[in-house]
Image (tube, rainbow, N blue to C red):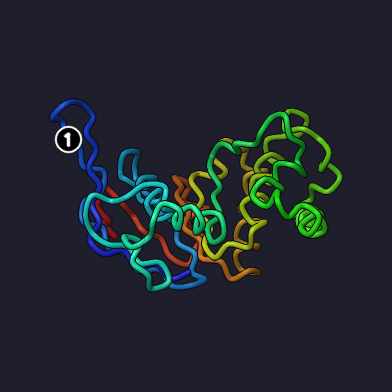
Amino acid sequence: MEIKVQNISKNFFIAKNVETKALREVSLDIKPGETVAVMGPSGAGKSTLLHILGLMDKQTSGRIFLNGKDAADFSDNECAKIRKEKIGFLFQMHYLLPDFTVFENVLIPVWEQKSKKTPEIHNLLQQLGLFERREHFPSEISGGEQQRAALARALINGPELLLCDEPTGDLDRETGQLVEDLIFGECKKRNLTLVLVTHNPELAQKADRIVRMKDGRIIQ
């Protein structure tokens, strides 16, 4: 997916008549298939930018173009359709549903296509080393396995863009490296655009480019 961000700002009201600026005239171009790591201190605006790119929030001003189309022209239903079909999300918390098995959690985005998608899910779980865990519940598998299941769920719809927010932040280093390698490996294999928020410089170095933020601005 091609992304063009033009001078976007995002303001929040944290109390009556008290406004804070999360993003300040941010501009950024990302090419299809490019992997970009976004770094910066807490409060720099990294996650806010990610949420806006994922059409989960809207900027206060400025414009965003996804594959050449102005996101301002999308209706709420169109935004939901794009999120479902073209964007995968992976967060620090895996957000797996505790009463669903690994297989069922991965199936959720394509539930209405269960019979058609089952072989694809099995193949994906095999690639991610989870096939033998497919009938386990999240509480019965490790943190690394939970995050791999969340990655499978993010990929099952064949997205063009993968957005990750500290995806290995809760994992030990060895497990984190395994998940990181899977993320970058799958993006390369599928030619996905990746935008990754992280505090980990070793993880950021795996990306094609590092974007650094501070106080709501891109500084490098």
Query: Where 178 falls versus 141 (above or below)?
Result: below
**Most foreground residue, 182 or 173:** 182
The structure residue drawn at horizontal position 21% and vertical position 51%, both measured from the top left corner, is: 24
**How many C-alpha atoms fall within 10 Å of the one at disc 1: few (<14), some, or many (≥20)?**
few
Which percent across, then down, holds residue 131? 83, 48
> Residue most toward the right?
132
Which image quarter holds the C terminus?
A: bottom left
The structure residue drawn at horizontal position 65% and vertical position 69%, both measured from the top left corner, is: 189
Which percent across, then down, holds residue 12? 24, 38
The structure residue drawn at horizontal position 58% and vertical position 62%, both measured from the top left corner, is: 159
Q: Is residue 115 left or right of residue 21?
A: right
Query: Where 168 falls versus 54 (above or below)?
Result: above
To which residue does mark 1 refer? Answer: 19
Res. 135 image quadrant: top right
Tell me if residue 112 can be seen. Answer: yes
Query: Where 179 falls versus 67 (above or below)?
Result: above
Which percent across, then down, holds residue 4? 34, 68
Tell me if residue 179 can be seen. Answer: no
Query: Where 44 falls versus 68 (above or below)?
Result: above
Q: Is residue 190 left or right of residue 39?
A: right
- Kind of element beneath mark 1: strand
Which percent across, then down, holds residue 115? 81, 55
**Most foreground residue, 201 or 209:** 209
**Most foreground residue, 43 or 41:** 43
In the rendered picture of this protein, how many numbered marks are placed on residues? 1
Three-letter amino acid code at the position of disc 1: Glu
> Residue most toward the left?
17
